[in-house]
Image (spheres, rainbow, N blue to C red):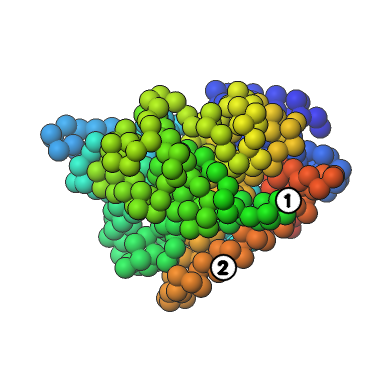
Amino acid sequence: MDLNGFMADVEARSPGEPEFHQAVREFAEKVLPIANADARYADARVLERMVEPDRVIMFRVVWESDAGEIQVNRGYRVQFNNAIGPYKGGLRFDPSVNLSILKFLGFEQTFKNSLTTLPMGGAKGGSDFDPKGRSDEEVMRFCQSFMTGLYRYIGKDVDVPAGDIGVGAREVGYLFGQFKRIQNEWSGTLTGKGVSFGGSPLRTEATGYGCVYFAREILARVDGGLEGRTCVISGSGNVAQYTAEKLVELGARVVTLSDRQGFVHDPEGVTLEKVRWVEELKTSRHGTLEEYPRIWGGTFHAGAAPWSVPCDVAFPCATQNELDADDARRLLANGCRLVCEGANMPVTYEASKVLEAARVAHAPGKAANAGGVAISGLEMSQNAMRMSWTREEVDQRLRRIMRQIHEHCVEQGYVDDGWVDYVRGANVAGFLKVAEAMLALGIV
Ligand code: NDP
């Protein structure tokens, strides 16, 4: 089976889904040589089965605005693959949400969850609802209606959703409250819960912290640590905030953050105080970074991404396809030596090829941002045991998991002259575990 033939089939079966095609192409390109070389995989058509979700659930979500107007949104849950454990993956609330985006995210999630070493299958869901500009009451009514549509398809041993873009602690709280009310049961069916009602310490920080731990492993292998490195971050939401926080703690210099309006360049470096201010701006006031220079100095660049700012390490932490081939060339020209993905698929396919050709380390999201779902997995364990670990215990486990993911990536992605193709490493390591489980489970 060759890549183009394989992709032609995928595109014909799922037309009009460009993000899904992109995610499958990136994966298949690295995994096909392995799948073709082992007759067990080819005979059982493991790869063809992997790119077809177990099921897709779509439902109407009706709710009433504060002004008394009836609103109609669409809810989704893509249950992609549960070969190695219950479905697990976040919910995204954003006007851009569609089936293509959720299929790409659910597909990626399957291999990310496999990499964590924990028993979790892959899923993703969400809605085209936009929480921006909505009151808490509106968000609550929407979440309650959404969960009324979803609850029958999820459960602690079936499918365990969590947050993603537009779904933070507030939304998870409302979703969990409605699930609990309908089912009359308290179970760890959602993760990312508040610590007072079953959430794990460090879950909020885990994706960003984990991403920095992963970058540190990569740099330690080739040329030292993070201390003194100049880092460029995109985004200013959950992942970006805690990536920035951990980088600052480890002595790196963070010089940018961004949002949908543009990016802020702070040559003096973001401090912990500034990160706390950004957190308050984004989670309580839902404001934009345009305000940043007035208080902290630096400059705001409307409508632009931060990739033209010279750096040692780039952390794209906002959204998919936010860093294209020209951006990658700019980063390389300015001396960037590592692109570490906090977001899911933030680097376009063409940009990924530019980085690969230059042999620059490129850590894909399915490895670098797996810390979030790993701690979600630990939240499920704590809920099942009716106990809670300390922040330090969870942090230790997070470091260990990120180190193990890094080792698996090096094992499968080592090329020559010490260069590691992390994209290949992550995809192949994630694939092998799921493939072996699928073979063992028979033709289902
Ligand atoms: P948040 O909603 O907390 O933050 C998203 C950030 O990205 C915001 O700053 C937002 O800007 C910005 N952004 C979103 N869409 C765009 C766009 N189209 N163009 C420019 N900027 C944009 O989400 P998270 O931080 O949770 O998620 C960020 C990424 O990380 C996503 O790809 C997500 O899938 C991935 N991820 C998240 C995990 C988690 O645990 N939360 C786990 C693993 C991956 P604004 O402030 O203007 O809205």
In the picture provided, is 396 more to the left or to the right than 125? right
Q: Is mark 2 within 8 Å of ligand 1?
A: no
State the image coordinates of residue 270 (x, y, percent, origin top left). Answer: 42, 46
In the picture provided, is 270 more to the left or to the right than 72? right
| Mark 1 burial class by Cα count in 10 Å: few <14, some 14-19, many 20+ | few
State the image coordinates of residue 23 (x, y, percent, origin top left). Answer: 62, 35
* Dots 1, 2 in contact, CB < 8 A: no
The number of numbered badges drawn on the structure is 2
- C-alpha distance separating marks 1 and 2: 24 Å
Q: Amino acid at mark 1?
A: Val
Identity of the residue drawn at 45% across and 74% down:
390
Q: Which residue is mark 1?
A: 222
Disc number for residue 306: none
Residue 182 visible (yes or no)? no
Identity of the residue drawn at 62% across and 65% down:
400
In the picture provided, is 443 more to the left or to the right than 187? right
Q: Amino acid at mark 2?
A: Arg
Question: In terms of secondary structure, where does tag 2 sit?
Answer: helix
- Disc 1 versus disc 2: nearer the observer: 1
Q: Which residue is mark 2?
A: 397
